Image (tube, rainbow, N blue to C red):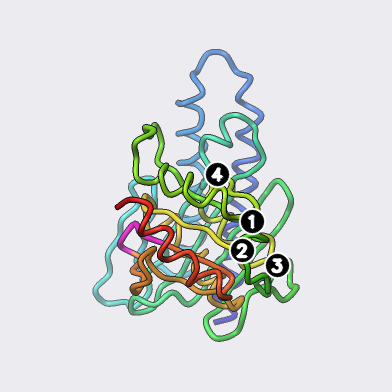
Amino acid sequence: MRDFVQTAEEAARRAGHVLRAWSSKFTVREKSRSNLVTEADEAAQAAIYEFIHSRYPGHGFCGEEGLSIERSDSPYRWVIDPLDGTTNYVHGFPYYCVSIGLECRGEMIVGAVFDPNHDEMFIAVRGEGATLNRRKLRCSSIDELGQSLLIASLPVATSGHDEAVRRFLTVLPIAQSVQRTGSAALNLANVAAGRVEGFWSTSLKPWDMAAGILLVEEAGGTISKIDGSAFRLDEPDLLATNGTAIHQQLLPILTGATR
């Protein structure tokens, strides 16, 4: 397991360096920002894939930028998001990250989320806990919605009538604050770090959540769908909290908001 952790961490750092290097090119006028961010995304994913594949050539891969390698002869699959928080990255807003998770027979066993702007490396290992720059993580102990900081994920180009918007507006006056930040993986990492009490979304992909859900679980938090049923990585339905009474308090609010 130690080798897997070291590999995930090194791959995430390499991708983070790629993203920081590419960000300086956004002053170039010959190309559009959308072209540049696509190239940065692809370059970061290539750095991750090349490094991990060199160590584990028999493993499977699933990545945001069209990376899909299925291996029936291996129980391992790396789930990669080379740039989570694309819009933030394009605008120079320092809330984006690299996310790398490792599955074994469908269960997430290692997760790494790297924030290159703050040099924060979040690591989770199944059954061994979660850390931030080697320091043990624990979710917050806040158990009242009125004292909680929450984050909601809203789909891109959503309308005011979208169910996700209605959930956001329903929880807003009940919690201390509800934010929308633009990086699911960092949101989950911050739940694990005790900085945020909860995060929910119904529009994520597996690579957005893979590493983050393990961070939350290993830091003592709770993961489910927004109706309280069992979470599945291949379904875009997630409620992650600090594991206190806040989880149960949110369930009827989030499900009732769209009825």
- Whole-angstrom CA distance, mark 3 to mark 2, is 17 Å
**x, y percentage for residue 12?**
58, 57
Q: Which residue is the site of mark 1?
A: 149
Callout 1 touching callout 2 (CB < 8 Å): yes
**x, y percentage for residue 225?**
37, 66
Q: Which residue is the site of mark 4?
A: 180
**x, y percentage for residue 249?**
50, 68
Q: Which mark is residue 222?
A: none
Q: Which mark is residue 197?
A: 2
Callout 2 touching callout 4 (CB < 8 Å): no
Q: Is residue 44 above or below residue 138?
A: above
Q: Residue at x 64, y 65 (%)?
A: 122
Mark 2, Cα crowd under 10 Å, few <14 / some 14-19 / many 20+, is many
Q: Looking at the image, which is closer to me, 56 or 38?
A: 38
Q: Which residue is the site of mark 3?
A: 132
Residue type highlighted by circle 3: Leu
Q: Earlier in the sequence, mark 3 or mark 4?
A: 3
Q: Nearer the viewer, mark 1 or mark 3?
A: 1
SS at badge 3: strand
- Whole-angstrom CA distance, mark 1 to mark 3, is 20 Å
Query: Magenta region's main secondary structure?
Result: loop
Residue type highlighted by circle 1: Leu
- Whole-angstrom CA distance, mark 3 to mark 4, is 23 Å
The reply, left or right, for residue 248 in relation to residue 255 is right
Q: Is residue 59 visible?
A: no
Q: Earlier in the sequence, mark 1 or mark 3?
A: 3
Q: Is residue 169 visible?
A: yes
Q: Earlier in the sequence, mark 1 or mark 2?
A: 1
Residue type highlighted by circle 4: Arg
- Whole-angstrom CA distance, mark 1 to mark 4, is 11 Å
SS at badge 4: loop
Considering every residue shown, the one lying at the far bottom of the view is 127
